[in-house]
Amino acid sequence: MRPTLLFATLAALAPALTAQAPAIHTLLPVPASVAMNGARFPLDAGLTVAITGFRDGRLERAVGRALTRLEGRITVPLTRTYSADRAARLVINVARAGYPIPDVDEDESYTLDVSGEQAALTAPTVVGAIRGLETLLQLQAADGRGYFLQGTRIKDAPRFKWRGLLEDVGRHFEPVEQIKRTLDGMAMVKLNVFHWHLSEDQGFRVESRRYPRLHEMGSDGLYYTQAQIRDIVSYATDRGIRVVPEFDVPGHSTAWLVGYPELASVPGPFSISRTWGVLPDVMNPIKESTYRFLDGFIAEMALLFPDRYWHIGGDEVNPQQWKASPTIQVYMKAHGIKNEDAMQVAFNRRLFGILKAHGKEPVGWDEILQPDLPKAAVIQSWRGVNYLTEAAKQGRRAILSAPYYLDHIKLASEHYLADPLPANTDLTPAQQALILGGEACMWSEYVTPEIIESRIWPRLGAVAERFWSPREVNDVNDMYRRLEVTSRRLTEFGLTHESQTDAMIRRFAAGDDAALFSGLLEYARPRGFGLGPGANATQFTPLTRLMHAARTDPWNGWRMNDRARRAAGGDTAAVRGLREDFARMAQFRAGLEGVRDRIPMANDGMPVAGALLDLSRIGMQALEYVTRNATPAPVWRTTADSTLKAIEGKTFGQLRPIGAEAVRALVNAVPK
Amino acid sequence: MRPTLLFATLAALAPALTAQAPAIHTLLPVPASVAMNGARFPLDAGLTVAITGFRDGRLERAVGRALTRLEGRITVPLTRTYSADRAARLVINVARAGYPIPDVDEDESYTLDVSGEQAALTAPTVVGAIRGLETLLQLQAADGRGYFLQGTRIKDAPRFKWRGLLEDVGRHFEPVEQIKRTLDGMAMVKLNVFHWHLSEDQGFRVESRRYPRLHEMGSDGLYYTQAQIRDIVSYATDRGIRVVPEFDVPGHSTAWLVGYPELASVPGPFSISRTWGVLPDVMNPIKESTYRFLDGFIAEMALLFPDRYWHIGGDEVNPQQWKASPTIQVYMKAHGIKNEDAMQVAFNRRLFGILKAHGKEPVGWDEILQPDLPKAAVIQSWRGVNYLTEAAKQGRRAILSAPYYLDHIKLASEHYLADPLPANTDLTPAQQALILGGEACMWSEYVTPEIIESRIWPRLGAVAERFWSPREVNDVNDMYRRLEVTSRRLTEFGLTHESQTDAMIRRFAAGDDAALFSGLLEYARPRGFGLGPGANATQFTPLTRLMHAARTDPWNGWRMNDRARRAAGGDTAAVRGLREDFARMAQFRAGLEGVRDRIPMANDGMPVAGALLDLSRIGMQALEYVTRNATPAPVWRTTADSTLKAIEGKTFGQLRPIGAEAVRALVNAVPK
C-alpha cells in the first residue's frame, strides 16, 4: 500500500484536478471506513491495469467484467491484457485465492486507495477483490471534462457474514437469465448468498435424473436442467456468491407428490397446486422409504450444489394428515413422540443425519426450533425477530428474514431501519456472534419474470447496506440519495426495475395517455391472497393490470418527503416542487375519466384517484399555512387529520397514492 | 363457415354492441381482403374455445400461446382445455397439418369471420391457422366496457412466399433469448424466413462436434450449442418460420481459418478479425481437402437445420490471394478458368454438388450470378434491384434485399415503398413467378444485444407488410398509424425497441436531465466504418453513446410530418402541436449546455443541436406565414432553402435532427 504522505503530496501538486471533484460519494453499501480525498482519477483509453499478486481465472474474469462495465461508461475500448507492473494506473493486488468455492467464513475485506494518479485495490482473497471492484465502479463519476474515479481511501469489511436474498421460483418460475441478472445485482451491492427456493406446492424446479418424475410431473415443464444449475452456480461463484438450495420438506411439498405419491401421508393422487397458502399435503415421516428417497435425492443434488449448507424448509407443516393417520399416530405413541411438532423434530433428526452423510449442514425456517432439535441446524427467523434471539440464546446460529420480506411491499426505509442486532440487544457478545446475518425474501405468488425485478430492486440495496455497513450508518435520506444512483447503475445488467412500469403501461395506453399513469401510484401488498374483492388469484391469474405495472416505493414518494421537510424549513424551490406534485395529483381523476372510454385499465385507478385528490387538497392547504406562517381554525386540523387517517396505510384496489407521508409532515408543520 | 346472412342478422339484432366499435382496423400486414362489419365480440372469462378439425401439438401450442397473450390483455384466466364444440365462441378449424417442417411452398392462407357472437378461424394448414391467430390478436381492441375483437370478415394469403429477416450474429453475437424474441416478433407480422448469418470474419457461431476448433477458436466462446440450435429451430417451426442457415464461403471466412488454417489460400496463421470490411482471407478452391471438409461440415449441420435451403454466402470474395497464389493460378490455367470470378463459379459448382448430396438447395448473394453458374441457386439481390430482374430473366429464382437493409437506418417509409415487383416491372408473368419474395437484413457491425431490437423494430413491420399485402396497400401515413400500434404490441414478447432509448440514457443522465435527450434525435447510419471523425470502430468498441441510445425513425418525425400536412390545411390543433415541437427543438442546445458540466455524453449532442435550432427557427417562421396566409420576401425562401439543404440528409455526429421533412413541407406550403 502507498504511504499516506504520497497522497497528500499528489493532492497538493494537482489542485486543478480536484477542483470539481464532489466531496460526497454514492457508495452503497457504505464501507466500514471511507475518507474521500477530493482527488480526480481520470478514466480514459490511457488506463493501464495490473494484477500484481496472486491471480487465477476467477480474478481475471472479475477484472475483465469490471473493465467491460467501465468501457461502457467511458465509451472507449480498454486494453484486455493485464501486466504485473506496479506502476500501472489501476493496480489490483490479491494475497491468495481464498476458499475454492464461496464459504460463509471467507475473508471479504479489501482496501482501496484512489489518488489522482493511481487506484490501488488490495485484498487478502479473490472475493475481497471482487467486493472492492464493485466499490471502485461506484466511485466512477463524470463532469464536463469526462469520466473519473473519485479519490478516496477505503478500508472495508462486512458487518455480517451471511447476506442473502431468497428467490422463490416454485410459485412462479423464473428463467436462467433472470437469475443471472439477480446475481449480478447482488454482487453490485455486496450480497453473498443466493437462497434458491426450488420446490413448492406449485412446482418442483430441478431436473432429477434419479427421480425424473419430480420435474417431469411436478413442474409444467418449467424447471432448470442440471446443466443450467451448474451454469448458475458457477456464475454465482465467479461473483463470490454462495448458492444455498432449498428443497422444502416435509410440508410445501405437493409438487414432489405428483410423481411420487408414495412419499405422502395420504394415498393421493396429487396434482400441482394452483392456489396459495398452507396446503394439507405433507410427507410421510414414518416410512423408511421416505428417507431412502431423500437420501438418494440429496446424494444426487449434493453434486450440483457445492455449498456446505442445505435448506430443508420445514415451515408451515400442516399437522392435519398426521393427526388423521392411524399408522402415524400408532408410530408416534410407540416411539413416545408426544405431538406433531415432535414428529417433525424426529423427521428432521433423520434428515440431518442424511445431510451430514452427504457433507451438508442444515438450515431451516424457525418452525423447526422445537425442544430436542439437534444443535446442527441454522435457524432462519421469518415469523418474528424473537425467534432469532431465542435461537441465539439456545446457542444456535441464526439468520434474520422477518423484517426483510420484499413481497410485503414495504418502503425501503422500513427494511433499512430493521437491524439484526440493534444497539439495545440483550444478547451476550457470545450469543451475538451466533447471528450470522440476514436474508431478504422474494416470495413469488404475485410476480412473473416481467415483474419480479421491480419488486426486488432497488429496495434490496437498502437491505444489503443494513447487512454490510456499520450499524451507525442509518440516515434514511442519505440512503435514498445513494439508492437512486444505485438503481440506475443496476440497469447496467439489463435489470428491468426502472423500465417495467412504462413497458407495461405502454401495453394498454399509448403516448400521452401513458404519461397519466406514471409516478403517482405505488403497488400495495395483495391481501388475503386475492386480487381485489371476490377475485381469488391462482398461479394462472395474469399479472398485467395497473397495480402490477405500479412501482413499489416509487422515487416520487421519497422526493415529496424530502421536499416537505425542506418546505417546512422555508426552501422556496421545495415549495414550488410540491405545488407541482399536488397539481398533478389533483388532475389524476379527471385524467382517468378522460380515458376510461378507451382504456379499461383506467378503472383500476379510480379507487386511488379519490385518495390522491384528498391528499392534494390537504397538502396544498397545509403548504399555504406553512408558507404564510398562518394558523388555521382548529377544525381544519381535525378534518385534515381524519381524512389523512382514512388514507395512511390503506390500499385502494392494491394501489396506494404517493404523498401521504409528505402531506402528514406538512400538516404537522402547520402553525398551531 | 357461417353464412353471411347470419352475420347481417346478428348485427341488426345487437345495435348496442356495435355502437362504439371503431370502423378502422390496426392490422399489420393488411390482409388480402378485409371487410370490417362493426360488430363487437366481447373478450372475457366466458370465452370458450374449440379446435374442430385437424389438430396436432403445434396447433394446440399456437392456440395456447394466443390465449395466454389474450389473458394478459383481458387480465382474467382463460380455460386451457379445448373442446371440439362448433358452438364455442372461438372456433378454429384446420384441414390438415401441412408440411411437417415449414416449407417455402406451404399454404399460409386463412379466413377469419368475427361477429358479435362467434369468431371463426378457418385454414387449410396449421401454418395458415398460426397466421390467422396473429390477425385475430390484432383485432383486439378496448373501450369503456372492456375488451373485444373488432368484427370483420377476412380472406387472406401472402403475396410472396419468401418473407424473411437476416440476422447477422457473426460480427456481434446475440443470445438465444434475443433470437427467440425476434422469432416471436416475426410471427406477429407474418414473416416466415429467419435467415441466420452464422459465420463471419469476426466469429464462427455454431458448435461443430466434427470440427470443434471452428467454435472453440473462432468464436471468443460466443456460439450456439447444438442443443440451442435445435431449440431455436423448433421454436421457429412452432411459429411457421423456416430457419435458413448461412455459412458464408469462400470469403468472409476468417473465423473458420483460425482453427483450420489448412482451408486457407495462404499459409496463415489467422486470428478472429476485429475490424469490418472486405478482408483478404478466402478459402482455397483448388484443394480437395477443402471440399472434403465442407462435405463433412455440411453433413453434420444438415441434421441441425432441416430447411431444404442452405445459404452459401458467396459475397465480397476478395480475389487478391487467388491472384497472388502460383498454385491457384496454375490450376486455373490448367482447367481453363479464365479469371477469379470463374474460379468462384467452379468452387460453387463443387459446393452445390455437396449440398445436393445432403438434400439441400443453395441460396447465394448476387455476386454468384456469373456465367455458367448452375441454375439450382436462388439469387439474393443485395447490391441492387437489377440483380433481381437479371436473375429472373436468366430463369433463376430470386429474392430481394437491396432496399431492405435495416442497418442503413432509413425511414420505415423508404423500405415500405420499395416493391420487389413494382407495377411497371418489365418481367414476363413467368419471370415474375421466379421472384420468391424478399428479406430485410440486420447486419451487426453496430448493434449489441442491447441495441439490436431497436434497429430491427418497428421498421421491420413495414417491410413485412410489403412482402405480405397486395401491392396497392401503400399509404405511408396509414402504415405509420398501424405501425405505432404494432410497435407497442411487439413489446408483449419482451422486445426492447420501445424501452431501449430511456434505458440507455438513464445510464448517463438522471430524472429531468434524461428527459432532455428524448424524442428529438434520430440515429444515423455510421459512415466509413467509423464512429465519428478519426475513430475507427472495432468489434470491441463500446456502443453506449448518445447516438446508440437514439432511435431510428422516431415517431416524432412521422408525427411532425402529419402535423405539417394538417397545419397546411388549417388544422389549429396541428399548428399548436408544431409550435410545441419547435419550442422544444429550440431549447435543446441550451439544455445541453446546462448539463455539460456533469454529463460528458451531452457533447455527443452538440453538433446536432445547431441543426435543431435552425429547423425550429425556419419552421416557426414558415408556420406563421402559412397560418397568416402571408407571402414572405423572396430572400426568406432562398435563405430557408439553403439552410434546409445543409441539414436534409446530413448527419451530425451520427445523429440526425427530427423535423427536417416537416419543415420542408411547411416551407413548400408558404404562399408565394
Image: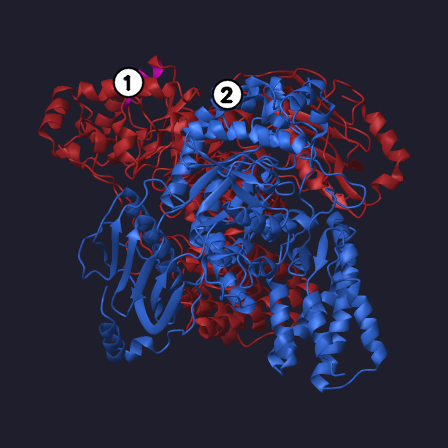
Chain colours: A red, B blue
Q: Position of residue B523 (x, y in %)?
A: 67, 53
Camera sees residue A433: no
Question: Camera-side residue: B397 or A589?
Answer: B397
SS assignment for the magenta stretch, majority: helix
Question: Camera-side residue: A403 or B79?
Answer: B79
Specify the subunit that label 2 lies on: A
Binning the other alpha carbons within 10 Å of mark 2 as few (below 14), some (14 to 19) or many (20 upward) gives many
Q: How many marks?
A: 2
Residue A355 located within the stretch drawn in magenta = yes
Specify the subunit that label 1 lies on: A
Q: Position of residue B355 (x, y in %)?
A: 47, 30
Binning the other alpha carbons within 10 Å of mark 1 as few (below 14), some (14 to 19) or many (20 upward) gives some
Disc assigned to residue A295: 1
Residue A285 located within the stretch drawn in magenta = no
Give the amino acid type for the residue marked by disc 2 in the picture: Asp
Q: Which mark sits nearer the N-terminus, 2 or 1? A: 2
* Residue appearing at x 38%, y 72% in the figure: B144
Disc assigned to residue A94: none
Part of the protein shown in magenta: A348-356
Q: Is residue B439 above or below residue A314?
A: below
Residue located beneath label 2 in the image: A103
Classify the position of the C terminus of chain A by image quarter.
bottom right
Q: Where is residue B401 in the image (x, y as percent from the top left)?
A: 57, 49
Question: Disc 2 and disc 1: Cα gap in Å?
Answer: 24 Å
* Residue appearing at x 67%, y 44% in the figure: B544
Query: Which secondary structure lies at badge 2?
Result: loop
Find the residue positioned furthest to the right: A13
* Residue appearing at x 68%, y 74% in the figure: B579
Left or right: B31 as drawn, with respect to B669: left
Camera sees residue B632: yes
Q: Is residue B617 above or below residue B276?
A: below
Q: In which quarter of the image is residue A262?
A: top left
